[in-house]
Amino acid sequence: MSVLVYTENWDGRFKKLAYELVSYASKLAEMLKTTTTVISIGNVDDSELSKLGQFGADKILTVKGDNLNVLDNRIFTAIISQAAEREKSEIIILPHNNTGKAVAPRLSAKLKSGIVTGVISIPVSLGPFTVVKKVYSGKAFSKVTIKTKIKILTLAQNSYGLTETVKQGSIEEFKPEISKDLPVTQVMNTEKQKGKIILTDAEIVVSGGRGMKSPDNWGPIEELAELLGAATACSRPVSDEGWRPHEEHTGQTGKIIAPNLYIAIGISGAIQHLAGISSSKNIVAINTDKEAPIFEAADYGIVGDAFKVLPELIKAIKEVKS
């Protein structure tokens, strides 16, 4: 038996999320006294695949093909399920992002397995197998027990740190049987945003709310983001008012993000907004209202006027960088 973990790639490269998944799977495999098998779908060079061994991958199954560079729920489910059968895997781990949310439920139905989404830690018990996840938009925690033989977990981003456990990470080509009856998803055209950091990929995000009072006051936020190499974001009221584009809206009804650093400026912290940013590794809040809900979620808080705090913060960062 091996713990199986699916690692997504972006244009043939792995990001921090992939290494976090392998680190988590490796620790779980250690607890179970078994091995860690990674499955990679799509064209990824062996030099990139070998990096997974640094974080505890004993074996790396690679399924290559130009038609596999685009997510197709049914095909990916078929591939991962066959890999699980080959490795006799009773625990399968996927990311808790759009890909994981699309594939994990199908995989659960196909394998008749229990599933827990958004897991935030190593199991608190192996008998019975019990894991912890956030509920009520991050306001509470729930312990969930899985009783089926095969168990599927999706891991919340930034919930488990990177742990280097260097192993051989042998690479094997895996050729699953894919039914010809399954349709193949084709991307006819791709338009990528240029000259700006994509919000969902950003390690640092600077976000503004109604406390900025006007779209004309966004200059300091954009300057701070540029200094930090960050993406810009906003709360829903700001995008609804047309102050900022809707693609910058973060929250339960907007983009769900998990950067290493999220700076919230003039955002009160409604529960819908916190649901979209609660997986951020570090949250810094700047608000005039010391009772604002955002401070309950923040790791660091500044009670003050953003129009006075921002210039001082920008000045300090410029001095450090110089």
Image: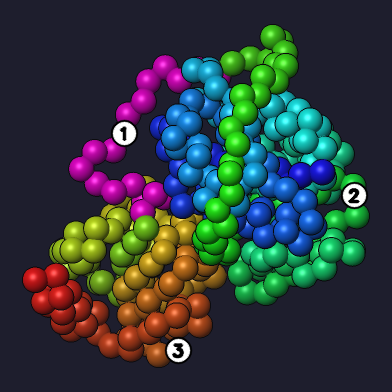
What type of secondary structure mainly makes up the magenta span? Answer: loop
Tell me which label, 3 or 1, sits earlier in the chain.
1
Depth order, front residue of 193/60:
60
Please name the residue shown 58% across and 32% down the image.
171
Q: Quadrant of residue 133?
A: bottom right
Q: Is residue 41 above or below residue 24?
A: above
> Which element type, helix, strand or loop, lies under badge 2?
loop
CB contact under 8 Å: marks 2 and 3: no
Q: Is residue 251 magenta?
A: no
User: For the C terminus, which image quadrant?
Assistant: bottom left
- Quadrant where the N terminus lies? top right
Q: Quadrant of residue 145?
A: bottom right
The residue lying at 73 percent from left, 48 percent from top is: 35
User: Between marks 3 and 1, how big is the CA–CA gap?
Assistant: 40 Å
Q: Which residue is mark 3?
A: 291
- Where does residue 118 sit, x and y in percent of width and height? 65, 57
Q: CA distance from mark 2 to mark 3?
A: 45 Å
CB atoms of marks 3 and 1 within 8 Å:
no
Classify residue 78 as left or right of residue 139: right
SS for dot 3: loop
Measure the alpha-carbon separation of dots 1 and 2: 42 Å
Q: Which residue is mark 1?
A: 192
The residue at which mark 2 appears reads as 148
Closer to the eye: label 3 or 1? 1
Say what amino acid the circle numbered 1 marks: Lys
Residue under the image location 39 percent in, 49 percent down: 201
Residue 7 sits in quarter: top right
Between 42 and 28, the one lying in front of the other is 28
Query: Vertically, is 113 above or below 70?
Result: below
Q: Which numbered disc, 1 or 2, marks the residue that appears first in the sequence?
A: 2
Specify which label sits upstream in the sequence, 2 or 3: 2
Range covered by the magenta-colored residues: 185-202
